[in-house]
Image: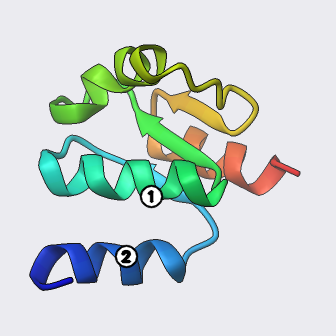
């Protein structure tokens, strides 16, 4: 691994949850790593980029992570959900 991939792996390995805002290929890569690691994931609604396609991607690959995926309208809502997830 080199460059962005190595950085993305290091990030995902060292966090308790992921909040996705906008993004392109690197964000998509980090999202898929977070899915595979079983991390809680928050998508910031309306932020553009890959966030607009996450539900489609999950449906396309047949993954249901609804128990650990939340779509938030605001940063405060995202943090509140993460604080309360078990």
Quadrant containing the N terminus is: bottom left
Relative to 67, residue 76 above or below: below
Residue at the image position 21 percent from the left and 73 percent from the top? 5
Q: Are marks 1 and 2 in contact (CB under 8 Å)?
A: yes
Residue 54 or residue 46, whichever sits in front? 54
| Residue linked to disc 2 | 9
Q: Position of residue 32 (x, y in %)?
A: 41, 48
Determine the secondary structure under disc 1.
helix
Quadrant of res 52: top left
> Callout 1 environment at 10 Å: few (<14), some (14 to 19), or many (20+)?
some
- Residue 44, x across and y down, in percent: 39, 36
Tell which residue pokes out farthest to the right in this image: 86
**Residue 59, above or below 46:** above
User: What is the distance, in whole Å, between disc 1 and disc 2 at their CAs?
Assistant: 7 Å
Front-lying residue, 33 or 45: 33
**Which residue does the image show at 26% across and 82% down from the upper left?**
7
Between 54 and 2, the one lying in front of the other is 2
Scheme of colours in the image: rainbow
Q: Position of residue 29 (x, y in %)?
A: 28, 54
Left or right, 22 with respect to 67, comes to left
Q: Residue visible at 60% across and 60% down?
A: 37
Q: Position of residue 51 (x, y in %)?
A: 29, 31
Q: Residue 68: which quarter of the image? A: top right
Counting every numbered tag in the picture gives 2
Tell me the SS state at disc 2.
helix
Image quarter of residue 21? top left
Residue for point 39% across, 84% down: 10
Q: Which mark is residue 33?
A: 1
* 24 displayed left or right of 55: left
Relative vertical location of residue 62 with respect to residue 22 in this rendering, above or below: above
């Amino acid at each position: 691994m080199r460059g962005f991939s190595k950085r993305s792996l290091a990030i995902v390995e060292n966090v308790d949850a992921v909040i996705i805002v906008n993004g392109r290929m690197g964000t998509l890569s980090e999202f898929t790593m977070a899915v595979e690691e079983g991390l809680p994931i928050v998508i910031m609604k309306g932020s553009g980029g890959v966030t607009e396609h996450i539900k489609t991607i999950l449906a396309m690959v047949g993954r249901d992570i609804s128990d650990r995926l939340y779509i938030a309208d605001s940063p405060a809502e995202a943090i509140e959900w993460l604080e309360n997830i078990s």
